[in-house]
Image (cartoon, rainbow, N blue to C red):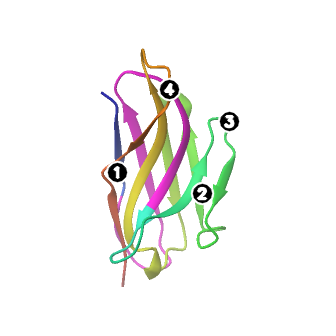
Amino acid sequence: QVQLVESGGGLVQPGGSLRLSCAASGSIASVNDMAWYRQAPGKERELVATITRGGSTSYADSVKGRFTISRDNAKNAAYLQMNSLKPEDTAAYYCNAQIRPTGIFIFITSWGEGTLVTVSS
């Protein structure tokens, strides 16, 4: 069974920084695209950033220049460095990955359970 686990959320003041981590565990043959999504209270889940296995990245306009997504393929992990945080960044952040489990020949979309980020003074 494959699992994604996020960590690193918390309370931070406006202008501060946080680094989120996401680790995939289980019997994994390969991890393809990884991404971070977020969902604020009363709003729909939105895509924040994506990264391919080769390291190509893309970002939502609202976080460009402030957030940086990265990954470590050897650890099946992804990270989200968040700088210059704003109150509107407050949300539950979810890791998403396309994972091919061992012995399976398709990629399965996997989600973590989320980590809460609160930006407030």
In the image, which disc is placed on residue 18? none
Q: Do tag 2 and tag 1 residues touch (Cβ < 8 Å)?
A: no
Find the distance from the CA under tag 1 to the CA under tag 4. Answer: 27 Å
Instruction: Tell me, for residue 7, which label it has, or none.
Output: 1
Question: Is 97 part of what is drawn in magenta?
Answer: no
Write down the residue under mark 4.
106
Are the residues tagged 4 and 3 within 8 Å (C-beta)?
no
Q: Residue type at mark 4: give it.
A: Ile
> Residue shown at 53%/44% (left/top)?
34
Q: Label 3 sits on what residue type?
A: Gly
Q: Residues within 10 Å of mark 3 (few under 14, many from 20)?
A: few
* Range of magenta residues: 9-37
Disc with the residue nearer the chain's start (2 vs 1) = 1
Quadrant that contains the N terminus: top left
Residue at (49% x, 20% y) in the render: 105
Question: Does dot 2 land on a helix, a strand or a loop?
Answer: strand
Magenta stretch prevailing secondary structure:
strand
Specify which label sits upstream in the sequence, 4 or 3. 3
Would you say the residues marked 2 and 3 are in contact, meaning their CB atoms lie under 8 Å apart? no
**Residue position for label 2:** 68
Q: Which mark sits nearer the N-terminus, 2 or 4?
A: 2
Residue ID for mark 3: 54
Residue 17: horizontal and vertical position, in percent? 48, 67
Disc 2 and disc 1: Cα gap in Å? 16 Å
Give the CA distance from mark 2 to mark 3.
15 Å
Instruction: Tell me the amino acid under the disc marked 2.
Output: Thr
Picture coordinates of residue 79, whole percent (x, y)? 50, 48
Viewer-side residue, 51 vs 87: 51
